[in-house]
Image (spheres, helix red, strand yellow):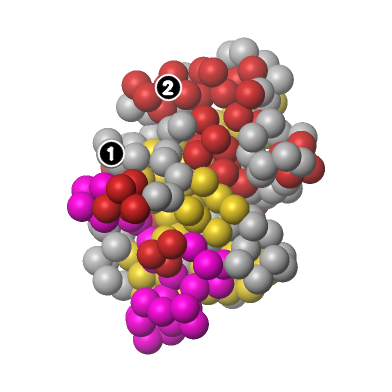
Amino acid sequence: MKSAVIVFPGSNCDRDVAVALQQVTGTAPEMVWHGGNELPKVDLIVLPGGFSYGDYLRSGAMASHSPVMREVVKRATGGTPTLGICNGFQVLTETGLLPGVLMRNAGLKFLCKDVWLRVENTDSLFTGRYRKGEIIRVPVAHGEGNYFADDATLKELEDNAQVAFRYVTRDGTVSDEGNPNGSRNNIAGIFNRRRNVLGMMPHPERLAEAALGGIDGRRLFESLVDAL
């Protein structure tokens, strides 16, 4: 499986996700600088976490206009699996590849901690190794992870089973207590309608090996290997 990680000025999780991909696939991903117009032929594109362009203006807004993003949008629209993590999720919404927007956390503070997620949909390239309804632990690290969409968009996401992960308490309850940032419907990650694009605020690459304290995130990458 060949993959590419897009690197923006300010990316700080590009190496983390590259290590996770190499460990799971056995092949180092291509690290693609945002300023170029070309993208190698790959099976998977990853937009990593970090603070692209220092997160000035809206997070991800400037990165969405980087030259390479024209090709990323073209490939993703054409069906190439595309994963956006944290800042990468923000970039995906800014390009229109995913609906909605990521706003300031409800508490107006940067959050860096483990959270509990419920797996909402396993019928995708990204979630095949999870069980529907399974509760997993994955870290978050963001100041603007508050997912917002209007009522009509939320209904469409729910009706089409496009919600991939939802914030919950440890026992799986969907509540304000389990929602770290105020996201509507406790949404932590969503698919596009074709389910070849996934955006999520939590960082699966940060719990992809036992030495990091857990492996709940590893199965996302293993799911991609199985599918691709």
Q: Would you name the residue on which mark 1 appears?
A: 193
Location of residue 14 by image quarter: top right
Q: Would you name the residue on which mark 2 appears?
A: 75
| Residue type, mark 1 in image | Arg
Looking at the rendered structure, the number of numbered marks drawn on it comes to 2
Using the rendered image of the protein, determine whether residue 183 is visible from the camera's viewpoint. yes
| Residue type, mark 2 in image | Arg
Please provide percent x and percent y for residue 147. Answer: 50, 55
Q: Residues within 10 Å of mark 2 (few under 14, many from 20)?
A: some
Residue closer to the observer: 24 or 152 = 152
Secondary structure beneath disc 1? loop
Image: magenta residue range: 156-183
Q: Residue furthest top?
A: 37
Q: Residue at x 43, y 55 (%)?
A: 189
Using the rendered image of the protein, determine whether residue 126 is visible from the camera's viewpoint. no
Location of residue 76 by image quarter: top left
Whole-number angstrom distance, CA of label 2 to CA of label 1 = 15 Å
User: Magenta stretch: residue 174 in it?
Assistant: yes
Image height check: is 199 above or below 32?
below
Where the C terminus falls, by quadrant?
Answer: top left
Image height check: is 59 above or below 213?
above
